[in-house]
Image: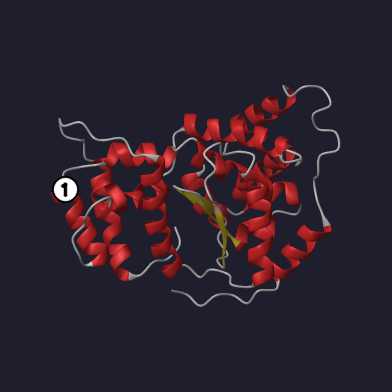
Amino acid sequence: MLSFNSNARNAGGILALVGSLTIGAGCVPAISTQQEVQLGDQYAAELNRELPLVRDQAIVNYINSLGNQIAQRADPRGLRYHFYVVNAPEVNAFAVPGGHVYVNRGLIERATNMSELAGVLAHEIGHVVHRHSVEQIQRAQTANTGLAVVYGVLLGRSPSGIEQIGTQVIGSAVFAGYSRDAEREADETAIRFLVASGINPEGLVTMFEKLLAERQRNPGGVAEWFSTHPTTEERIETTRQEIARLPAGSLQNLNTNSQAYADFRSRVNGLPASASR
């Protein structure tokens, strides 16, 4: 994971512990879409204070344009999505409930065409659409006393209102990694989202292949990605098969690359390295 401040780092173990506790006999209320957005906004605000986000307006505009091109055709709830580029060399991407998607510059540097980055964005959007993190948050909910301990470590105050539902277990839900079924579901729907957006879904496969090949050459270079995105040859083949099942002619006239993406990637490559946090 990316580096956080000392309080957040110390809380990491507690978050993991809370996430592993079983829920008591009482019924845990379902998290509504409105609550999901509120929880996601609160957690994203914390992340945005900690992460070395890229502020270059041209980069910000492009990643949001590409991401929302997909999200608007993907999420029937009409959520407002936000996309961020993190100035970090590690290969990683993740989504926060409610529509916040983060991509490291290290991943963008390896995505040689637009469809490869779009494939990653569509996959992360799929996790939001299917509420995979929300499901993990609900499984990790515990007694208010447990949440209060975690919340106090992170923010130095007691939780209230919606925060008691599970705001601070969201970190462990986002970064713990998803099940194989959840990853497959995100892959399958990403293909549909990309086609609906006029983007060639084969970029999702070529990006996976590229990262798998790099792992074999230099495991440390893509360790963060594989810690939360288990990518295997079987998963790549399954994705290829899903694309092959598309109706004949579905891939015709779909975009793989653009000059706008080339300009964006060149601008990202030219960014100075961020100061360590």
Give me the residue at 58% from left, 41% from top. Answer: 123
Please state the horizontal and vertical placement of residue 257, each as a whole percent of the image: 80, 50
**Residue 248 visible at all:** yes
Residue that appears at 61% across and 48% down? 121
**Taking 24 as reference, is 210 left or right?**
right
Count residues near mark 1 (Cα–Cα under 10 Å), then give few for <14, some for 14-19, many for 20+: some
Please indicate whether residue 61 sits to the left or right of residue 90 in the image. Answer: right
Q: Residue at x 27, y 53 (%)?
A: 163
Quadrant (top left, top right, bottom left, bottom right) of the C terminus = bottom left
Quadrant of res 33: top left
Q: Quadrant of residue 177?
A: top left
- Find numbered disc 1 in the image and state the secondary structure of the residue it sits on: helix
Residue that carries the numbered disc 1 in the rendered image: 144
Residue 212 in sight? no
Indicate the colouring scheme. secondary structure
Towards the viewer: 179 or 170: 170
Q: Position of residue 260 (x, y in %)?
A: 79, 60
Question: Residue 4, relative to residue 216: is it above or below?
Answer: below
Q: Position of residue 140 (x, y in %)?
A: 28, 41
Answer left or right for 70 relative to 261. Answer: left
- Number of disc labels: 1
Identify the image quadrant of the N terminus: bottom left
Q: Nearer the viewer, residue 161 or 213?
A: 161
Quadrant in which residue 153 is drawn: bottom left
Amino acid carrying mark 1 in the image = Asn
Which residue sits at x=28%, y=47%? Answer: 166
